[in-house]
Amino acid sequence: MGQEAKYRVGMVSKLTGLSTHTLRMWEKRYSAVVPERTDAGGRLYTDADVNRLRILHRLVQSGHSIGGIATLPDPELRQMAAALPGATAEPVPQHLPAIRARVMNAIEELRIEDAEQILSRAALSTEPTEFFTEVLAPILIEVGERWEKGELRIAHEHACSSVARGLLFALMRLYPVQDARRRAVVATPARENHELGALMAAMLAAMHGWSVLYLGPDLPAEEIGYAVTSTQAELLLLSITNLKPSECERQITAIESAVPERVAIFAGGRAAKAPAQGRTVVQKDLSLLEAVLTR
Ligand code: B12
């Protein structure tokens, strides 16, 4: 996770559910986090700050006093949060590496139905962001690395992608729309053909009750603009895995001009890069996207 200070206080308030007033008080009075400062004196927060504030918020909601916990180290806070009723005790369940190994083995031998079965079962018994970050993404990365080294063939990579794609589509359809007015459009920009990150984001939005219009990969900015405007979507999620930084910024600038001002735009994926003056928030952490989806 990036440690670059990039969030302004308004965005941190949205991501954590804490008011800007509370944030200021927790910082000034209790030194809960120490944000960096912009040249103009504004506060800038890292992903780690946001995570810390979210945990503190959960603990305060469950009865702890902020004064008693504000300066505790992160591991201790995580331990306390894990002990709360309803929290999952283990940060990463022990069986997930074994599942990854079984899936990799099935892919190596092109036993695709086996890979599908193991992954589907794991998806249904694991919390979705954990399934993505601990199971599916590491498998995709390993397949990509081993393909690059020549240890796996294009056939393995394509088979793996098609299993992942099918599974993510199926998962996305599992969730009924809870509020048809909360519409999200999900796509990848023009010339970006990697769509699995977009599907992960789309599935999370669907899981949180959003009505999701999934446009798939390689969409010109005007088409994204058209889809967002005509469905009156309030959220646009983009995923970028392989565009060059300058091309990514160019596409995002064009998308920002094509999409109404009121629409929030988030971009993730390993190659996501947004223009400095733009309004797109780069967010590579799916669990932080969940905070936006549930607010
Ligand atoms: C699957 C795959 C493909 C499939 C894609 C199928 C599909 N339907 O999507 C196919 C076969 C089409 C493909 C093609 C190519 N690929 Co490819 N591919 C991959 C592979 C194995 C997985 C990609 C992927 O889905 N990753 C998982 C994503 C989900 O991870 P992520 O981007 O890091 O995103 C994480 C977060 O940022 C977050 N996230 C993602 N999106 C979003 C969005 C939001 C809103 C949020 C909040 C979060 C979020 O979730 C993820 C999990 O934590 C990667 C290996 C790798 N390391 O990623 C190579 C890789 C990306 N491909 C690569 C290459 C070179 C290519 C080709 C150029 C190959 C070729 N010579 O033809 C083409 C280019 C296609 C194109 N024009 O764009 C290289 C890129 C090298 C680079 N630039 O650094 C990689 C890294 C492989 C490698 N190691 O060399 N590829």
Image: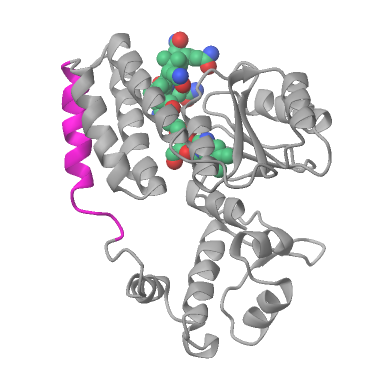
Q: Is residue 208 visible?
A: yes
Q: Could you tell whether 131 is left or right of 294 in the image? A: left
Q: Could you tell whether 9 is left or right of 173 in the image? A: right
Residue drawn 16% across the image and 32% down it = 102
From the top left corner, tell me how far across and down residue 80 is, in percent: 36, 77
Residue drawn 74% across the image and 22% down it = 221
Residue drawn 80% across the image and 32% down it = 259
Query: Mainly helix, strand or loop, the magenta region?
Result: helix
Q: Vertical placement of 202 versus 51: above or below?
A: above
Q: Is residue 95 magenta?
A: yes
Which residue is more in the foreground, 34 or 168? 168
The part of the chain drawn in magenta is 91-109
Q: Vertical placement of 175 versus 7: above or below?
A: above
* Count of all numbered marks drawn on residues in the image: 0
From the top left corner, tell me how far across and down residue 170 is, in percent: 40, 29
The quadrant where residue 10 appears: bottom right
Q: Is residue 22 magenta?
A: no
Which residue is more in the foreground, 155 or 177? 177
Instruction: Locate the C terminus and report the quarter of the image it occupies.
Output: bottom right
From the top left corner, tell me how far across and down residue 244 is, in percent: 60, 24
Which residue is more in the foreground, 216 or 193? 216
Q: Is residue 269 visible?
A: no
Q: Vertical placement of 38 versus 75: above or below?
A: above
Q: Vertical placement of 251 versus 66: above or below?
A: above
**Display colour scheme:** one colour
From the top left corner, tell me how far across and down residue 96 is, in percent: 23, 45
Q: Could you tell whether 212 is left or right of 51 in the image? A: right
The quadrant where residue 232 appears: top right
The quadrant where residue 182 appears: top right
Residue drawn 51% across the image and 75% down it = 56
